[in-house]
Amino acid sequence: MTYDATLAETVTITGHDGHRIEAYSARVLSPAPSGGVVVIHHMPGYDDQTKEIARTFSTHGFNAVVPNLYHRDAPGAGPDDAAATARAKGGVPDARLVGDVAGGAAYLKGLSNSNGKVGVIGYCSGGRQSVLSACSLPLDAAVDCYGAFVTSPPPEGMALKFTPIKHLIKDLSCPLLGLFGADDKYPSPDQVTELEDELKAQGKTYEFHSYEGAGHAFFSVNRPSYRPEAAMDGWHRIWDFYGRYLS
C-alpha cells in the first residue's frame, strides 16, 4: 500500500527583499524524495481554491507551497479585499513576484524529503508570472495555465501595470507546459501562437495544448467558466509533465 499521508498548514517564508510573508504549505509525509511545486495564485487571490490545488499536488506526491502575493498589500484581509487592494495598485510588481517565488522554491528545497527539484505553476495572472519566474530563476519545470499579457500589454483602461515579457523567453530556464482555452481573449489564440513562435525561435523545450469550447479559467471548479473535460485533460498533462521533470 502506498503511504499517502499529507500535512497542509499555514507557514511563513522569506520572500522578496527578506520580507517574511504568509504561505500555504501542503507536503507529503513520506521520507521518499519528492519534487516541489510553487503554486502562484490567480488574480482573485490567495483563496480556498488555490489552497485546494496545493493539496492536490501533495496527494499526487509533490510538495507544494502557495506564497500569499498580496500579504504586504493587505495583511490579514480576506482574499476578495486583498485582491481588490492589489489590483488598485496595478498588481504585484514583477521583481517582488520573482523574489516571493524564489522564497517558495527555497522553502521547498529545505524540506527534509526534497529531491532538489522545483517547478512552478500559475493560473490567469499567475500563468504570466509562472513564465516570468521560469525566465528569472533556475527552475526545473513551469506550467502556464492561460497566462495573459506575456506577449501583449493589458488593454487600455485596465488598472494592471503588467508589461509584456516576450523578450525574456531567451532566458527560460526549464521546459514549459502551456494550457489554453481556444475561446479565451486574454490570451487570445493569436497571442498563444506568438508565444509559441518565440519559444521555437529560441530553441526552448515546450508543449502547448489548446481546448476548443473552453475560455479563460476553465480549471476553476467554482466558476461558470469551468470546463470539466478540458480541466481533467489538463491535469493529466500536468501529472505527466511534472512526472518527467520533477520526479
Image: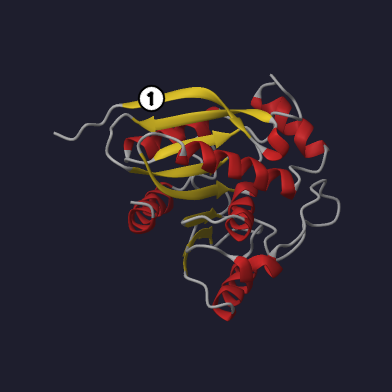
Q: Which residue is drawn at 56% across and 47% down?
A: 123
Above or below: residue 108 compared with residue 80 = below
Q: Mark 1 points at which residue?
A: 7
Residue type of the residue flagged with mark 1: Leu
In this rendering, position of residue 104 left or right of residue 82: left
Above or below: residue 222 compared with residue 156 = above
Q: Where is residue 121 in the image (x, y as percent from the top left)?
A: 51, 49
Which one is in front, 205 or 53?
Answer: 205
Q: Is residue 42 visible?
A: no
Q: Can residue 94 be seen in this view?
A: yes
Residue that protrudes farthest toward the right in the picture: 157
Instruction: Give the quarter of the image for residue 81.
Output: top right
Residue that protrudes farthest toward the left in the picture: 1
In this rendering, position of residue 58 left or right of residue 176: left
Instruction: Give the quarter of the image for residue 187.
Output: bottom right
- Mark 1 is surrounded, within 10 Å at the Cα level, by few (under 14), some (14 to 19) or many (20 or more) other residues, namely few
Q: Where is residue 136 in the image (x, y as percent from the top left)?
A: 63, 57
Q: What element carries label 1?
A: strand
Q: Which colour scheme is used?
A: secondary structure
Instruction: Give the quarter of the image for residue 33.
Output: top left
The N terminus: image quadrant: top left
Q: Position of residue 238 (x, y in %)?
A: 40, 53
Residue that protrudes farthest toward the top in the picture: 76
Q: Residue at x 76, y 45 (%)?
A: 93
* Count of numbered badges drawn on the protein: 1
In this rendering, position of residue 244 left or right of residue 137: left
Q: Where is residue 226 in the image (x, y as percent from the top left)?
A: 49, 44
Above or below: residue 135 compared with residue 119 = below
